[in-house]
Amino acid sequence: MRNRTDENPQPSGMPAVPRRVMLRLFLDERGLNNADLAKRFDVSLPMISRVLNAKEAPRKYVEGLRDEFGVPEALLPVATDKKPGPQPKSASAAA
């Protein structure tokens, strides 16, 4: 039986390959590049690069990659509903 987790979807005993590298290989095998994805999601190339390389990404991009392009969950960043950019300071931190 092979040991697989969301963090390391490779078979045990193999050198760890970062998730983002495996995601890039998955997309390359299907002939998809950042320009294709940026056009589909109507974002800039730097934005789609941030999405693909981040540990967390907006849910709409993660779900789009999974549902429209068949990207396995183990290769995707964690979906989040947080808005990108600086987060507001909490009331307790301001006191």
Image (cartoon, rainbow, N blue to C red):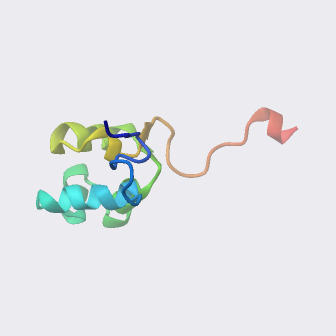
Please name whichever residue, 45 or 25, is drawn nearer the observer in this view of the structure.
25
Residue 38 location (% of width, % of height):
25, 58
Please name whichever residue, 19 or 32, is drawn nearer the observer in this view of the structure.
19
Q: Quadrant of residue 74?
A: top left
**Residue 36 seen in this snapshot:** no
Asked if residue 15 is positioned above or below residue 93 in the image, the reply reads below
Residue 17 location (% of width, % of height):
38, 60
Residue 70 location (% of width, % of height):
18, 42
Question: Residue at horizontal 25%, vertical 50%?
Answer: 41
Question: Residue at horizontal 32%, vertical 40%?
Answer: 2
Q: Quadrant of residue 37?
A: bottom left
Q: In the picture provided, is 7 more to the left or to the right than 1? A: right
Asked if residue 69 is positioned above or below residue 81 in the image, the reply reads below
Please name whichever residue, 46 or 19, is drawn nearer the observer in this view of the structure.
19
Hey, which residue is sitting farthest left in the picture? 31
Asked if residue 57 is positioned above or below residue 18 in the image, the reply reads above
Quadrant showing the N terminus: top left
Residue 82 location (% of width, % of height):
51, 38
